[in-house]
Image (cartoon, helix red, strand yellow):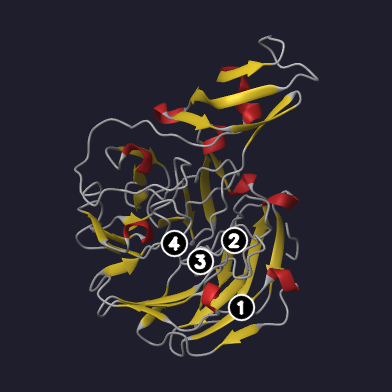
């Protein structure tokens, strides 16, 4: 595991909407080669023509349209080269990057008082940024980039009422609320499902195996529904196929079962047998999936608290298993993120009773271990952005 490898401002009342009935249209990035057969191109050529030909420069003025699953419409801008067209890469999003410097920051949340303590890497981790009243009883942190400015926004999900409260950086951290989307048995599952670089609100109900998503590109009006998984499954949405869209995914610790619906394959589901083995995990294992090898695809991963061992199935190695021993322990929570900005997610763990952090940076070959004492404490949980 030592390999390296828009701004959208939302009106404050936009999120507080009731559900509409039909799946919305969305826009997303797409791969040029896979989109060619059904694409409608806006372009002109030097010397005319209508097909790709070697040695001809095609100037792409806007985008292509492509119909996809759930009625999605994909749009993507391209750079032009002689004889070929390549999609321009979207900006890289870093989870837990509250200051936008492309490195994850350290953050903790206390439910009592809704207190956030954030140590920003862009400020040398000093001084600590503090926000009070952003959350409270029954509220869990669901930080992510909800406005598309490449900065993680503080946010909470009320597990009783289903209310979402967002403090978006592009809005000056004014509170925005989406009401009654979830609650009860519904688990938070936000992610960028439509590929517009803005996190969508998502919830998953294990009893029915239902995933519901409000898509940001449609103004969070209406939702699309995906049914898979079931009792004891937890949501682990990530971009597992590297197409820029988060893939619906669930994990069942009791059996080590993974189910992933790849957006790039028409949301066909793949189980753990297609990812390197009969079981990826076991009882008491948690699933900190992330892009550990820097290839742009999230890797299935599990963490065993009793031993502090990490098991990662790396996508760039055909899901060969990598093991990291003793990176944590029974009182430690996994908090992986890209703390050094090298595009590979680093191993890290947080101990709640002491507030201590341990980080193993990929850019240093995961050694030596970096210890950060006392950033948190008994009432604080680590913020793990979506």
**Of the two numbered discs 4 and 3 in the rendering, the one whose residue sits closer to the viewer:** 4
Q: Earlier in the sequence, mark 3 or mark 1?
A: 3
Residue 328 visible in the picture: no
* Label 4 Cα neighbours within 10 Å, binned few <14 / some 14-19 / many ≥20: many
Q: Are marks 2 and 1 in contact (CB under 8 Å)?
A: no
Specify the label residue 152 is tagged with.
Answer: 4
Q: Residue at x 46, y 60 (%)?
A: 151
* Label 1 Cα neighbours within 10 Å, binned few <14 / some 14-19 / many ≥20: many
Left or right, residue 347 beside residue 149: right
Q: Based on the displayed image, in which of its 4 quarters is residue 362 positioned?
A: bottom right
Specify the label residue 359 is tagged with.
Answer: 1
Read off the residue under disc 2: 301
| 18 or 262, nearer to the observer | 18
Give the distance between the C-alpha atoms of the residues marked 3 and 1, in whole angstroms.
18 Å
**Of the two numbered discs 4 and 1 in the rendering, the one whose residue sits closer to the viewer:** 4
Residue 306 visible in the picture: yes
* Label 2 Cα neighbours within 10 Å, binned few <14 / some 14-19 / many ≥20: many
| Location of residue 332 with respect to 151 vertically, above or below | below
Q: Based on the displayed image, in which of its 4 quarters is residue 71 positioned?
A: top left
């Amino acid at each position: 595991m030592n390999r390296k490898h828009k701004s959208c401002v939302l009106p404050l009342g936009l999120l507080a909407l009731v559900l509409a009935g039909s799946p919305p249209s969305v826009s997303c990035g797409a791969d040029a080669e896979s989109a060619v057969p059904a694409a409608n191109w806006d372009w002109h050529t030097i010397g005319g023509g209508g097909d790709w030909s070697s040695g001809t420069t095609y100037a792409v003025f806007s985008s292509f349209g492509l119909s996809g699953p759930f009625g999605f419409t994909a749009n993507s801008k391209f750079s032009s080269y002689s004889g070929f067209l390549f999609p321009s890469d979207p900006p890289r999003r870093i989870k837990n990057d509250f200051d936008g410097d492309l490195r994850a920051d350290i953050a903790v949340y206390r439910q009592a008082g809704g207190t956030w303590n954030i140590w920003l890497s862009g400020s040398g981790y000093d001084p600590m940024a503090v926000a009070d009243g952003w959350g409270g009883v029954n509220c869990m942190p669901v930080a992510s980039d909800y406005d598309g400015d490449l900065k993680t926004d503080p946010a909470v999900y009320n597990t009783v009422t289903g209310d979402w409260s967002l403090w978006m950086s592009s809005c000056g951290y004014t509170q925005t609320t989406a009401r009654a989307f979830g609650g009860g048995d519904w688990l938070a599952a936000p992610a960028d499902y439509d590929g517009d670089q803005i996190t969508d609100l998502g919830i998953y109900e294990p009893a029915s195996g239902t995933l519901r998503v409000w898509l940001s590109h449609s103004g969070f009006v209406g939702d699309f529904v995906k049914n898979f998984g079931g009792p004891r499954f937890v949501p682990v949405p990530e971009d597992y196929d590297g197409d820029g869209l988060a893939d619906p995914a669930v994990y069942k610790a009791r059996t080590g079962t993974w189910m992933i619906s790849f957006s790039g394959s028409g949301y066909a589901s793949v189980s753990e047998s297609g990812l390197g083995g009969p079981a990826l995990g076991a009882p008491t294992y948690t699933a900190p999936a992330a892009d550990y090898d820097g290839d742009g695809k999230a890797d299935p991963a599990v963490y065993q608290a009793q031993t502090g061992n990490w098991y990662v199935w790396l996508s760039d190695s055909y899901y060969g298993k990598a093991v990291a021993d003793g990176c944590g322990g029974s009182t430690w929570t996994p908090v992986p993120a890209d703390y050094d900005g090298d595009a590979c997610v680093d191993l890290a763990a947080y101990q709640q009773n002491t507030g201590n952090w341990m980080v193993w940076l990929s850019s240093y070959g995961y050694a030596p271990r970096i210890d950060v004492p006392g950033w948190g404490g008994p009432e604080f949980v680590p913020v793990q952005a979506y």
